[in-house]
Image: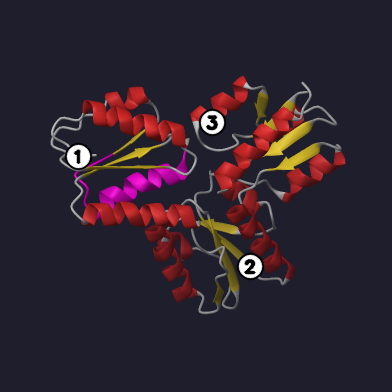
Amino acid sequence: MGVRTAVEKASRTLSLSSGKAVYCLHELVHNEQVVADLKARGLRFVESLDEVPDGATVLFSAHGVALAVRAEAQRRELAVVDATCPFVARAHRAVRDFAARGVPVVVVGRPEHAEVRGVMGACDGARVVSTPEEVAALPFPDGPVGVVCQTTLSSGTVRTVLDALRARYPHLETPPAADVCTATRDRQRAVADFVCGGGDGVLVLGSIGSSNTNRLVEVARAAGAAFAARAGTLEEIRALDFAGVRRLGVTAGASTPEDFFRCAVAALNGQRKGSRV
């Protein structure tokens, strides 16, 4: 839902731009095909608001941005189109609520990810943890602690870290934002169920820079798949060795275009030899 909404907003903004330049802060979504298509249609991707002229139109990506970025855009009178995923926006609201009540904030996620950087920018003093070991190093005293999660992590990772947080902080506050997004969770569960049900291979369609795509590969391997791989183009699919795979399951990251998914499955059905897709 978040990806689809972001792409629709970008497309509509370009259609209404009357030829004026439209900018996007960071990749709109983590998929090279989507980004290439939007570039071809005139969307200009930048890594800083310094690259956006005063008064111009700028999209905020699906991963969200820090409060300081919003304030800077307002100060410079930029026309903002906010394409933040609703699940990410929910995490931002939770963090602001914690901060307003003076509750320390922990973000479960990968510190280098754009979504986590945006959530961290929603309040001061938040800490990021990725493992139970990092929980042990948190500086917060006993008492209420609020937690939100990067929406594209594996559900297993989130459960493990949340268990460690609850053990250390009995009064841990876990709003709905302390979970991966519904689409991510459902796809991970489907992959695990497929492997446990006899599937011996899983192909995840998506870009190498997509967190939820990479997590699906990890989930397949953790479930016991003999073959688990990612591919973002037809060329990458053709380069894979499916020897020995009898039953192949195909899924995709949240930002993978549906037309590419259909083309990929058609290509796989055309090249299969003794495997069932």
Distance, label 1 to label 2, CA atoms, is 51 Å
| Image location (x, y in percent) of residue 147 | 56, 65
Going 45% across and 52% down the picture, which residue do you hit?
A: 184
Comparing marks 1 and 3, which lies closer to the viewer? Answer: 1
Going 51% across and 75% down the picture, which residue do you hit?
A: 169
Distance, label 1 to label 3, CA atoms, is 29 Å
| Image location (x, y in percent) of residue 156 | 37, 60
Secondary structure of residue under mark 1: loop
Q: 15 left or right of 107?
A: right
Coloring scheme used: secondary structure
Residue 237: name its quadrant: top left
Secondary structure of residue under mark 2: loop
Q: Mark 2 highlights which residue?
A: 104
Query: Could you tell me the amino acid type at mark 2?
Result: Pro
Task: Choose between 210 and 193: the one closer to the eye.
Answer: 193
Task: Choose between 147 and 214: the one closer to the eye.
Answer: 214
Which mark sits nearer the N-terminus, 2 or 3?
A: 3
From what the image shows, is residue 52 above or below residue 115?
Answer: above
Q: Mark 3 highlights which residue?
A: 34
Which mark sits nearer the N-terminus, 1 or 3?
A: 3
Span colored in magenta: 209-228
What numbered label is drawn on residue 276? Answer: 1
